[in-house]
Image: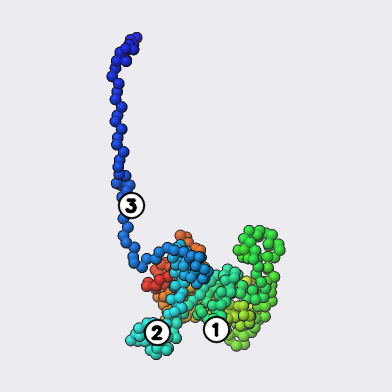
Amino acid sequence: MSSTPASSAAAAPATAAPAASAAPSQPPSAAQNAVLVQSVPMPADSLVVRGYDFNEGLDYHRLLRSYMTTGYQATSFAQAVVEVERMMAWRLSDEPIAAEETITSPEERAAVKCKIFLGFTSNMISAGIRETIRFLAQHHMVDVIVSSAGGVEEDFIKCLAPTYVGDFALKGSELRVKGINRIGNLLCPNDNYCKFEDWIMPLLDKMLEEQRTQGVVWTPSSMIARLGKEINHPDSVYYWAYKNNIPVFCPALTDGSLGDMIYFHSYRNPGLVIDIAGDIRNINSQAVFARKTGMIILGGGVVKHHICNANLMRNGADFSVFINTAQEFDGSDAGAKPDEAVSWGKIRMDAKPVKV
């Protein structure tokens, strides 16, 4: 086996190392172009993001106004405030007088306002939002109310007995044996519903008697007005709705304790009839014959759709604010964005609706 002599190995010329490349003086143009895209100038009326500065003192009006430039849902909230202000401010006198117009007097035109529909789900009445809604009805700041059965009965029940603050984590089985009902983190003793039964049963008897002897045709709205009259309590939303002649519609009146009471009454004193057909004509007419309409809807479900569908009859509401936590991705009406309602003709194409 041959081997290379050491002297031969030592005499072999060394291989030269490759020369080091010079460092690039500029970043790759592709990366630079991707990162440093040139902006077009922002529109002159663009709002600059800026929150409230508490160094300037605490001014609640300015604090809420600052939401417009705070961003995210604060901006949506501020946009909703602007939309509500627009519907409250509108007068027929703002519009040019059309050739076929029947109201031409400046004074009469200035008295014609936007008809505001307020809708809310039952949890709003169970919670402290009830007092805000009562204020709106008391001062006739809305024209039509739509709620669920719970949103009606809980108002009357609170006039009879209180609801309490609890906790979301309270165990249902332990509350059940104690006769305590949980609404989120609110607690409503079942005795409250017993008091409600004691109060409403004699009224259902009177309503049935008037149906038989006077030919009264009861609808959900006329029933709610009657209950508002009978509760005669200044804390009640529907007391003030009755006093101010604000119609209250509840298309699912039997879907709650009111339905339980009507069910029990049908055994004790059968025959009471509640006509939902009369109410659908009534609420649709409220929209059809209004010069302008606005919708403020807290929550979703039947309440939201009932108001929107009534406004379909006039080719859409002029002003709209939706406030809810639902998303559109399941195809529900509750989560539908206002633009979906535009496609159905429930909001006008030139409207500026807001969802919070």
Question: Is residue 30 in view from this perspective?
Answer: yes
Instruction: State the quadrant of the N terminus.
Output: top left
Along the line of sight, which residue is nearer the eye, 165 or 268?
165
Identified at 34% across, 12% down, the residue is 6
Q: Callout 1: 10 Å neighbours few (<14), some, many (20+)?
A: some
Question: Is residue 76 in view from this perspective?
Answer: no
Along the line of sight, which residue is nearer the eye, 201 or 305?
305
Along the line of sight, which residue is nearer the eye, 30 or 315?
30
Q: Which x, y percent locates residue 68?
A: 44, 67
Q: How many badges with numbers are in the image?
A: 3
Circle 3 or circle 1, nearest the eye:
3
Q: Give me the C-alpha separation between circle 2 and circle 3.
A: 52 Å
Q: Which residue is mark 3?
A: 36
At mark 3, the secondary structure is loop
Point out the residue furthest to the top here. Answer: 1
At mark 2, the secondary structure is helix
Q: Which residue is mark 2?
A: 93
Point out the residue furthest to the right here. Answer: 178
Label 1 sits on what residue type? Asn
Q: Earlier in the sequence, mark 2 or mark 3?
A: 3
Along the line of sight, which residue is nearer the eye, 60 or 233?
60
Q: Which residue is mark 1?
A: 244
Label 2 sits on what residue type? Ser
Label 3 sits on what residue type? Leu
Identified at 37% across, 87% down, the residue is 101
